[in-house]
Image (tube, rainbow, N blue to C red):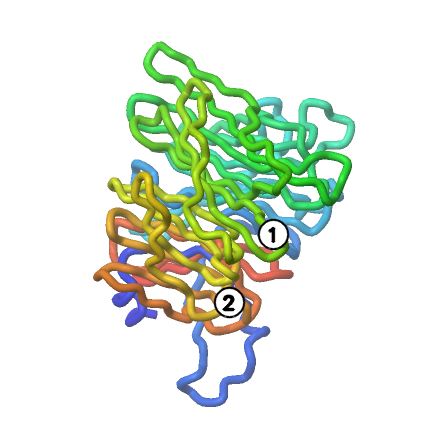
């Protein structure tokens, strides 16, 4: 791993790492995979079937790593893996992780649900968008799309944005923290029309911004109204924090689709959306990142992880595409730096980077049962890996100097 860290540079990878017991017997010493020592991040007290959430793609103002995880195995409230959210913080310089914290809302109730996208970081505050699981018999904690925020003082607050729950498609969406002259958050998500599993999905958005003396609130607002399905929105704050861009996937046929982008202002006015890809291929799971004036989009293009630059007013310029089928991707980076993690169809963790003008893809952990969750640049040398394994009882982080 030391040689690999020197090649990959300053980053943090987050993924689900297969346990040694699942590895095939190596054919030669060169083929052997060595898993380095791990530090526990979250131990929920049960063997989970799925972990959602990840680190935020931006470090906190203290150069710490922040994130949320939840663990799913069922909705039985007596089961520790019933979707409880855990918040965690790691120090990439000291190679340590603080004990995780169970998330409890302003009413003293547990927060349970599926984390829909990587959380966002604003200074020392962390926000995440979740599909909340219903608390039986408790109306203030009913299911729906919910914004969760962790404040620097250590308290958490939730805000319900929609009563939407699963029809046929799993909920999708993302949130971003405002910065500059405004503080607060933006959120966007997809809702499928109720009552019909074949009904189309539509994009919704909301925000809560404090811009000087002005408190600007946009409640649940529908953005798209066509009979086609619009899904998987990714939102990013732009400018001084009082505007946002959103990229999403639109189905144009059974096996075709396109990515679209729209811009928003705090007055809840959205520009007409425009196409940023062709429509001949399938385009899924977009992730929008804006840093140092560079707007990047990662997405699955015909089931292959891809990255492109998105200058104003033009279509995506494809810079990189994985050489193998992939899913579950995540994007980070600043300026001309690009960092991408994805999962191959064989269940391997792939890492791709662009630091010298060209992209390099590495089969980072060539064993099965992995799932990429997130990636973030760090200020010091080395690699830190946050991972989990299906049917195990903890997530962990690997630090490599």
Residue under pointer 2: 325
Write the residue at 36% across / 47% down: 315
User: Looking at the rendering, which quadrant does residue 196 occupy?
Assistant: top right
In whole angstroms, how far apart are the C-alphas of marks 1 and 2?
Answer: 21 Å
Q: Position of residue 108 (x, y in %)?
A: 61, 25
Residue at (27% x, 60% y) in the render: 9
Which is nearer the eye, 16 or 226? 226
**Residue 254 appears at what percent x and percent y?**
63, 54
Determine the residue positioned at 34% across, 27% down: 241
Coordinates of residue 34 in the picture (x, y in percent) = 43, 75
User: In the figure, is residue 300 to the left or right of 375?
Assistant: right
Q: Residue furthest left?
A: 356
Neighbours of disc 2 within 10 Å: few (<14), some (14-19), many (20+): some
Residue that carries the numbered disc 1 in the rendered image: 253
Where 134 falls versus 182 (above or below)?
below
What SS does tag 1 mark?
strand
Quadrant position of the N terminus in the picture: bottom left
């Amino acid at each position: 791993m030391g040689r690999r860290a020197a090649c990959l540079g300053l980053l943090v990878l987050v993924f689900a790492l297969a346990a040694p017991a699942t590895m095939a017997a190596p054919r030669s010493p060169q083929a052997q995979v060595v898993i380095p020592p791990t530090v526990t991040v979250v131990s929920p007290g049960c063997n989970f079937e799925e972990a959602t959430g990840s680190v935020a793609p931006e470090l906190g103002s203290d150069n710490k790593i922040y994130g949320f995880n939840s663990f799913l195995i069922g909705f039985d409230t007596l089961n520790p893996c019933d979707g409880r959210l855990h918040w965690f913080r790691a120090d990439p310089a000291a190679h340590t992780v603080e004990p995780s914290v169970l998330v409890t809302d302003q009413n003293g109730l547990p927060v349970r649900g599926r984390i829909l996208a990587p959380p966002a970081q604003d200074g020392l505050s962390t926000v995440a968008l979740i599909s909340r699981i219903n608390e039986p018999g408790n109306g203030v904690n009913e299911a729906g799309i919910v914004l969760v925020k962790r404040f620097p003082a250590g308290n958490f607050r939730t805000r319900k944005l929609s009563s939407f729950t699963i029809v046929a498609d799993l909920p999708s969406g993302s949130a971003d923290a405002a910065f500059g002259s405004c503080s607060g958050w933006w959120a966007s998500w997809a809702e499928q029309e109720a009552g019909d599993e074949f009904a189309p999905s539509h994009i919704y958005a909301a925000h809560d911004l404090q811009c000087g003396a002005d408190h600007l609130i946009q409640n649940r607002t529908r953005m798209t109204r066509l009979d086609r399905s619009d899904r998987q929105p990714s939102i990013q704050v732009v400018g001084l924090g009082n505007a946002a861009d959103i990229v999403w996937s639109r189905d144009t046929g059974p096996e075709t689709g396109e990515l679209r982008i729209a811009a928003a202002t705090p007055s809840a006015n959205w520009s007409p959306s425009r196409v940023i890809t062709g429509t001949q291929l399938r385009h899924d799971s977009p992730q929008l990142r804006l840093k140092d004036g560079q707007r990047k989009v990662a997405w699955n293009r015909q089931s292959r992880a891809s990255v492109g630059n998105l200058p104003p007013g033009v279509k995506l310029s494809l810079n990189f595409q994985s050489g193998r089928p992939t899913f579950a991707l995540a994007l980070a980076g600043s300026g001309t730096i690009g960092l991408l993690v994805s999962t191959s169809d064989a269940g391997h963790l792939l890492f791709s980077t662009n630091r010298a003008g060209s992209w390099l893809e590495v089969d980072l952990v060539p064993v099965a049962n992995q799932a990429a969750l997130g990636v973030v640049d760090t200020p010091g040398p080395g690699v830190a890996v946050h991972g989990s394994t299906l049917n195990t009882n903890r997530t962990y982080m690997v630090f490599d100097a």
